[in-house]
Image (tube, rainbow, N blue to C red):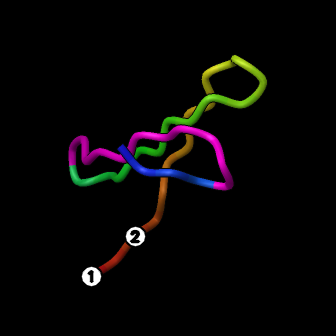
Amino acid sequence: MFLVEGESAIIYKQDNVWILEEYVNDELSKKELNLKF
């Protein structure tokens, strides 16, 4: 569990893609993150 801009968010890896799930105004927002390490 991560905190993003005061909202609760979950970041996890799925099929080599990092997914950010966060709740904004009680709605679930999913974003794909282009993270490269």
Is residue 29 placed above or below 15 in the rendered structure?
A: above
Is residue 16 placed above or below 31 in the rendered structure?
A: below
Q: Label 2 neighbourhood size at 10 Å, few (<14), some (14-19), many (20+)? A: few
Q: Is residue 22 left or right of residue 35?
A: right
Badges 2 and 1: C-beta atoms under 8 Å apart? Answer: yes
Q: Residue furthest front?
A: 6
Q: Residue furthest top?
A: 26
Quadrant location of the C terminus in the rendered image: bottom left
Quadrant location of the N terminus in the rendered image: top left
Q: Is residue 30 left or right of residue 10?
A: right
Characterize the magenta stretch by its predominant secondary structure. strand
Q: Is residue 11 magenta?
A: yes
Q: Which label was assigned to residue 35? A: 2
Question: Where is residue 10 drawn, in percent x and y?
Answer: 40, 40
Judge by depth and name the residue closer to the eye, 35 or 5: 5
**Which residue is disc 1 drawn over?**
37
What residue do we see at 32% from left, 52% from top?
17
Q: Which residues are magenta?
A: 5-15
Question: Where is residue 33 drawn, in percent x and y?
Answer: 48, 57
Q: Is residue 22 left or right of residue 18?
A: right
Judge by depth and name the residue closer to the eye, 21 or 17: 21
Q: Place residue 15 in its image quadrant.
A: top left
